[in-house]
Protein backbone atom coordinates (compact mmCIF):
# COMPACT_ATOMS: atom_id res chain seq x y z
CA UNK A 1 0.00 0.00 0.00
CA UNK A 2 1.40 3.36 -1.02
CA UNK A 3 1.62 6.15 1.51
CA UNK A 4 1.16 9.83 0.80
CA UNK A 5 3.84 12.48 1.31
CA UNK A 6 2.93 16.17 1.24
CA UNK A 7 5.04 18.65 -0.73
CA UNK A 8 3.88 22.24 -1.06
CA UNK A 9 0.26 21.14 -0.79
CA UNK A 10 0.64 18.22 -3.23
CA UNK A 11 0.05 14.59 -2.36
CA UNK A 12 2.92 12.37 -3.51
CA UNK A 13 2.58 8.60 -3.75
CA UNK A 14 5.07 7.96 -6.55
CA UNK A 15 8.20 9.85 -7.58
CA UNK A 16 10.68 9.37 -10.41
CA UNK A 17 14.25 10.65 -10.48
CA UNK A 18 15.67 11.09 -14.00
CA UNK A 19 19.42 11.68 -14.16
CA UNK A 20 22.29 11.08 -16.55
CA UNK A 21 24.72 8.99 -14.48
CA UNK A 22 24.89 6.63 -11.55
CA UNK A 23 25.79 8.86 -8.54
CA UNK A 24 24.11 12.04 -9.88
CA UNK A 25 21.10 11.59 -7.61
CA UNK A 26 23.20 10.84 -4.53
CA UNK A 27 25.13 14.08 -4.94
CA UNK A 28 22.02 16.15 -5.56
CA UNK A 29 18.72 14.82 -4.23
CA UNK A 30 19.31 11.69 -2.13
CA UNK A 31 18.20 13.36 1.09
CA UNK A 32 14.80 14.14 -0.37
CA UNK A 33 14.62 10.62 -1.81
CA UNK A 34 15.40 9.15 1.62
CA UNK A 35 12.65 11.22 3.26
CA UNK A 36 10.13 10.16 0.62
CA UNK A 37 11.06 6.50 0.88
CA UNK A 38 10.86 6.64 4.67
CA UNK A 39 7.32 8.07 4.34
CA UNK A 40 6.27 5.20 2.07
CA UNK A 41 6.54 6.95 -1.30
CA UNK A 42 7.39 4.61 -4.19
CA UNK A 43 10.56 6.06 -5.74
CA UNK A 44 11.92 5.04 -9.14
CA UNK A 45 15.40 5.86 -10.41
CA UNK A 46 15.82 6.23 -14.17
CA UNK A 47 19.52 6.50 -15.05
CA UNK A 48 19.93 7.30 -18.73
CA UNK A 49 23.63 6.52 -19.29
CA UNK A 50 25.84 3.64 -18.20
CA UNK A 51 28.53 5.72 -16.45
CA UNK A 52 31.24 4.01 -18.49
CA UNK A 53 33.33 7.17 -19.05
CA UNK A 54 33.87 7.91 -15.37
CA UNK A 55 37.47 6.80 -14.94
CA UNK A 56 41.00 7.94 -15.78
CA UNK A 57 42.49 4.55 -14.95
CA UNK A 58 44.32 3.32 -18.11
CA UNK A 59 43.63 -0.28 -17.07
CA UNK A 60 39.88 0.23 -16.78
CA UNK A 61 37.57 -0.80 -19.61
CA UNK A 62 34.19 0.71 -20.39
CA UNK A 63 32.51 -2.67 -20.04
CA UNK A 64 33.96 -3.31 -16.60
CA UNK A 65 33.25 0.21 -15.37
CA UNK A 66 29.65 -0.01 -16.57
CA UNK A 67 29.03 -3.05 -14.37
CA UNK A 68 30.82 -1.45 -11.41
CA UNK A 69 28.72 1.67 -11.64
CA UNK A 70 25.46 -0.23 -12.04
CA UNK A 71 26.31 -2.22 -8.90
CA UNK A 72 27.19 0.96 -7.01
CA UNK A 73 23.93 2.59 -8.02
CA UNK A 74 21.88 -0.42 -6.96
CA UNK A 75 23.65 -0.41 -3.59
CA UNK A 76 22.97 3.30 -3.11
CA UNK A 77 19.33 2.87 -4.14
CA UNK A 78 18.90 0.08 -1.59
CA UNK A 79 20.28 2.29 1.18
CA UNK A 80 17.81 5.01 0.25
CA UNK A 81 14.82 2.70 -0.07
CA UNK A 82 14.36 3.28 -3.81
CA UNK A 83 11.79 0.80 -5.16
CA UNK A 84 12.84 0.56 -8.83
CA UNK A 85 16.23 1.22 -10.42
CA UNK A 86 16.07 1.46 -14.23
CA UNK A 87 19.17 1.74 -16.45
CA UNK A 88 18.59 2.79 -20.05
CA UNK A 89 22.21 2.04 -20.98
CA UNK A 90 23.10 4.98 -23.24
CA UNK A 91 26.80 5.74 -23.49
CA UNK A 92 28.20 8.04 -20.85
CA UNK A 93 29.52 11.28 -22.35
CA UNK A 94 27.67 10.94 -25.65
CA UNK A 95 24.13 11.77 -24.57
CA UNK A 96 21.83 13.94 -26.68
CA UNK A 97 18.06 14.44 -26.33
CA UNK A 98 17.35 12.32 -29.40
CA UNK A 99 13.93 10.93 -30.22
CA UNK A 100 15.11 7.48 -29.14
CA UNK A 101 16.18 8.70 -25.70
CA UNK A 102 12.99 10.71 -25.35
CA UNK A 103 10.84 7.68 -26.18
CA UNK A 104 12.70 5.50 -23.68
CA UNK A 105 12.25 8.00 -20.85
CA UNK A 106 8.61 8.60 -21.78
CA UNK A 107 8.06 4.84 -21.64
CA UNK A 108 9.33 4.68 -18.05
CA UNK A 109 7.16 7.61 -17.01
CA UNK A 110 4.10 5.91 -18.49
CA UNK A 111 4.99 2.64 -16.76
CA UNK A 112 5.67 4.06 -13.28
CA UNK A 113 3.26 7.06 -13.46
CA UNK A 114 5.00 9.35 -10.94
CA UNK A 115 3.23 12.20 -9.19
CA UNK A 116 6.53 14.11 -9.20
CA UNK A 117 9.41 14.02 -11.68
CA UNK A 118 12.85 15.08 -10.38
CA UNK A 119 15.78 16.07 -12.60
CA UNK A 120 18.60 18.58 -13.01
CA UNK A 121 17.79 21.99 -14.45
CA UNK A 122 19.08 21.88 -18.06
CA UNK A 123 19.54 25.66 -18.11
CA UNK A 124 22.35 25.42 -15.54
CA UNK A 125 25.66 25.65 -17.39
CA UNK A 126 28.13 27.12 -14.89
CA UNK A 127 27.93 27.10 -11.07
CA UNK A 128 29.72 29.58 -8.78
CA UNK A 129 32.30 30.28 -11.51
CA UNK A 130 33.90 26.99 -10.45
CA UNK A 131 32.02 24.19 -12.17
CA UNK A 132 31.05 23.64 -15.81
CA UNK A 133 28.03 21.36 -15.99
CA UNK A 134 28.44 18.02 -17.74
CA UNK A 135 26.70 17.93 -21.14
CA UNK A 136 25.00 14.65 -20.17
CA UNK A 137 23.38 16.43 -17.20
CA UNK A 138 22.05 19.09 -19.52
CA UNK A 139 20.77 16.52 -22.03
CA UNK A 140 19.08 14.43 -19.32
CA UNK A 141 17.31 17.49 -17.94
CA UNK A 142 16.23 18.47 -21.43
CA UNK A 143 14.80 15.00 -22.04
CA UNK A 144 12.88 15.16 -18.75
CA UNK A 145 11.36 18.51 -19.71
CA UNK A 146 10.34 17.18 -23.11
CA UNK A 147 8.73 14.19 -21.42
CA UNK A 148 6.35 16.60 -19.69
CA UNK A 149 5.42 18.28 -22.93
CA UNK A 150 4.85 16.40 -25.17
CA UNK A 151 6.46 12.96 -24.88
CA UNK A 152 4.85 11.20 -21.91
CA UNK A 153 1.68 13.26 -21.69
CA UNK A 154 0.42 13.25 -25.29
CA UNK A 155 -1.34 10.28 -26.86
CA UNK A 156 -0.24 10.97 -30.42
CA UNK A 157 3.42 11.46 -29.39
CA UNK A 158 5.17 8.11 -29.79
CA UNK A 159 1.78 6.47 -30.48
CA UNK A 160 3.43 3.04 -30.49
CA UNK A 161 3.72 3.32 -26.70
CA UNK A 162 -0.03 3.01 -26.35
CA UNK A 163 -1.01 1.15 -29.53
CA UNK A 164 1.65 -1.56 -29.21
CA UNK A 165 2.69 -1.44 -25.53
CA UNK A 166 -0.65 -0.30 -24.06
CA UNK A 167 0.98 2.47 -22.03
CA UNK A 168 -1.45 5.30 -21.49
CA UNK A 169 -0.15 8.90 -21.46
CA UNK A 170 0.79 10.31 -18.09
CA UNK A 171 1.58 13.79 -16.81
CA UNK A 172 3.02 14.25 -13.29
CA UNK A 173 1.60 16.78 -10.87
CA UNK A 174 4.90 18.60 -10.68
CA UNK A 175 8.44 18.80 -11.99
CA UNK A 176 11.22 19.38 -9.47
CA UNK A 177 14.43 20.86 -10.84
CA UNK A 178 17.51 20.56 -8.65
CA UNK A 179 18.37 24.17 -7.87
CA UNK A 180 22.12 23.55 -7.38
CA UNK A 181 22.64 26.86 -5.57
CA UNK A 182 20.30 28.83 -7.83
CA UNK A 183 17.04 30.54 -6.74
CA UNK A 184 14.67 27.87 -5.42
CA UNK A 185 10.95 27.47 -4.79
CA UNK A 186 11.38 25.12 -1.85
CA UNK A 187 14.10 23.87 0.46
CA UNK A 188 13.55 20.35 1.81
CA UNK A 189 14.78 19.75 5.36
CA UNK A 190 17.10 16.73 5.18
CA UNK A 191 18.65 17.17 8.63
CA UNK A 192 17.30 13.83 9.85
CA UNK A 193 18.44 11.89 6.78
CA UNK A 194 21.75 13.55 5.97
CA UNK A 195 23.70 10.55 7.23
CA UNK A 196 21.63 8.26 4.98
CA UNK A 197 22.41 10.52 2.02
CA UNK A 198 26.13 10.39 2.84
CA UNK A 199 26.03 6.61 3.28
CA UNK A 200 24.38 6.23 -0.14
CA UNK A 201 26.99 8.54 -1.67
CA UNK A 202 29.77 6.39 -0.23
CA UNK A 203 28.43 3.44 -2.25
CA UNK A 204 29.92 5.08 -5.35
CA UNK A 205 33.47 4.20 -4.42
CA UNK A 206 34.74 4.29 -8.01
CA UNK A 207 33.81 7.97 -8.29
CA UNK A 208 34.63 9.55 -4.93
CA UNK A 209 37.66 11.63 -4.16
CA UNK A 210 38.69 12.39 -0.58
CA UNK A 211 36.87 15.72 -0.68
CA UNK A 212 33.45 14.45 -1.88
CA UNK A 213 31.79 13.78 1.47
CA UNK A 214 32.87 17.09 2.99
CA UNK A 215 31.68 18.92 -0.12
CA UNK A 216 28.21 17.32 0.02
CA UNK A 217 27.89 18.08 3.73
CA UNK A 218 28.85 21.70 3.11
CA UNK A 219 26.30 22.02 0.27
CA UNK A 220 23.57 20.62 2.50
CA UNK A 221 24.54 22.91 5.39
CA UNK A 222 24.64 26.01 3.20
CA UNK A 223 21.35 25.17 1.47
CA UNK A 224 19.54 24.41 4.72
CA UNK A 225 20.81 27.49 6.54
CA UNK A 226 18.85 29.84 4.30
CA UNK A 227 15.62 28.11 5.38
CA UNK A 228 16.52 27.64 9.03
CA UNK A 229 17.47 23.95 8.71
CA UNK A 230 20.68 22.18 9.67
CA UNK A 231 20.79 20.59 6.20
CA UNK A 232 18.71 20.99 3.07
CA UNK A 233 18.21 20.33 -0.64
CA UNK A 234 16.66 22.97 -2.83
CA UNK A 235 14.39 22.74 -5.85
CA UNK A 236 12.54 24.86 -8.32
CA UNK A 237 9.00 23.49 -8.59
CA UNK A 238 7.08 23.63 -11.85
CA UNK A 239 3.45 22.89 -10.99
CA UNK A 240 1.66 20.91 -13.66
CA UNK A 241 -1.56 19.78 -11.98
CA UNK A 242 -3.04 23.28 -12.32
CA UNK A 243 -2.76 23.32 -16.11
CA UNK A 244 -6.33 22.14 -16.67
CA UNK A 245 -7.74 24.50 -14.04
CA UNK A 246 -5.83 27.47 -15.42
CA UNK A 247 -6.77 26.90 -19.06
CA UNK A 248 -10.36 28.22 -18.89
CA UNK A 249 -9.20 31.34 -17.08
CA UNK A 250 -6.57 32.00 -19.74
CA UNK A 251 -9.23 31.63 -22.43
CA UNK A 252 -11.17 34.56 -20.92
CA UNK A 253 -8.51 37.07 -21.91
CA UNK A 254 -9.70 39.91 -24.14
CA UNK A 255 -10.40 38.54 -27.64
CA UNK A 256 -8.35 39.57 -30.61
CA UNK A 257 -10.10 41.28 -33.52
CA UNK A 258 -10.27 38.00 -35.41
CA UNK A 259 -11.76 36.11 -32.47
CA UNK A 260 -14.27 38.91 -31.81
CA UNK A 261 -15.36 38.80 -35.45
CA UNK A 262 -15.75 35.03 -35.33
CA UNK A 263 -17.77 35.34 -32.11
CA UNK A 264 -20.14 37.87 -33.74
CA UNK A 265 -20.71 35.54 -36.69
CA UNK A 266 -21.35 32.61 -34.35
CA UNK A 267 -23.81 34.64 -32.31
CA UNK A 268 -25.63 35.80 -35.44
CA UNK A 269 -25.89 32.21 -36.63
CA UNK A 270 -27.34 31.17 -33.30
CA UNK A 271 -29.95 33.90 -33.46
CA UNK A 272 -30.94 32.88 -37.00
CA UNK A 273 -31.26 29.22 -36.03
CA UNK A 274 -33.37 30.17 -33.01
CA UNK A 275 -35.69 32.33 -35.07
CA UNK A 276 -36.34 29.60 -37.61
CA UNK A 277 -36.74 26.88 -35.01
CA UNK A 278 -34.00 24.70 -36.57
CA UNK A 279 -31.50 22.91 -34.38
Image: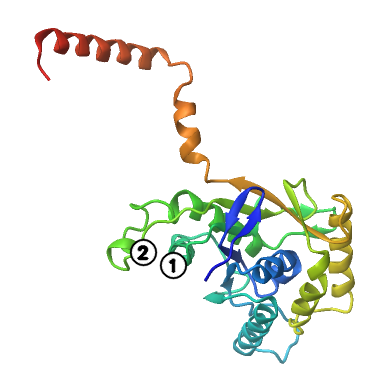
Residue 127 is situated, as x and y percent measured from the top left of the image, at 80, 54
Task: Give the image quarter of residue 225.
Answer: bottom right
**Classed neighbour count for the residue bearing mark 2: other residues with Cα under 10 Å, few (<14), some (14–19), many (≥20):** many
Q: Earlier in the sequence, mark 1 or mark 2?
A: 1
Task: Give the image quarter of residue 14.
Answer: bottom right
Mark 2 lies on a secondary structure that is loop
Q: Nearer the viewer, residue 11 or 101?
A: 11
Residue 42 is situated, as x and y percent measured from the top left of the image, at 57, 69
Q: Measuring 57% from the left and 76% from the top, which residue is drawn there?
A: 83
Q: Measuring 85% from the left and 73% from the top, which residue is drawn there?
A: 212
Q: Measuring 81% from the left and 68% from the top, which residue is drawn there?
A: 192
Q: Residue furthest bottom?
A: 59
In screen coordinates, is 131 left or right of 165? right
**Classed neighbour count for the residue bearing mark 1: other residues with Cα under 10 Å, few (<14), some (14–19), many (≥20):** some
Residue 65 is situated, as x and y percent measured from the top left of the image, at 65, 86
Q: Quadrant of the C terminus?
A: top left
List the residue tagged with mark 1.
Answer: 111
Q: Nearer the viewer, residue 10 or 115?
A: 10
Evaluate if marks 1 and 2 touch, with contact meaning CB atoms under 8 Å apart.
yes
Mark 1 lies on a secondary structure that is helix
Q: Measuring 87% from the left and 50% from the top, which residue is drawn there?
A: 226
List the residue tagged with mark 2.
Answer: 167
In screen coordinates, is 274 left or right of 40? left
Q: Is residue 146 above or below residue 192?
A: above
Q: Which disc number belongs to residue 146?
A: none
Amino acid sequence: MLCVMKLEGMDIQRAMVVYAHPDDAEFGVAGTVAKWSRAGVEVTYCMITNGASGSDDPKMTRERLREIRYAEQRAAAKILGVKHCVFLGYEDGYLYPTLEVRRDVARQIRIHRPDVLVTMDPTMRIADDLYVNHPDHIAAGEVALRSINPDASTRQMFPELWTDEHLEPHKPKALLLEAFGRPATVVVDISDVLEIKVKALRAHTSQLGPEAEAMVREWAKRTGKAAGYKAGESFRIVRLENDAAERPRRQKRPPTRARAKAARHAAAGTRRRSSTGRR
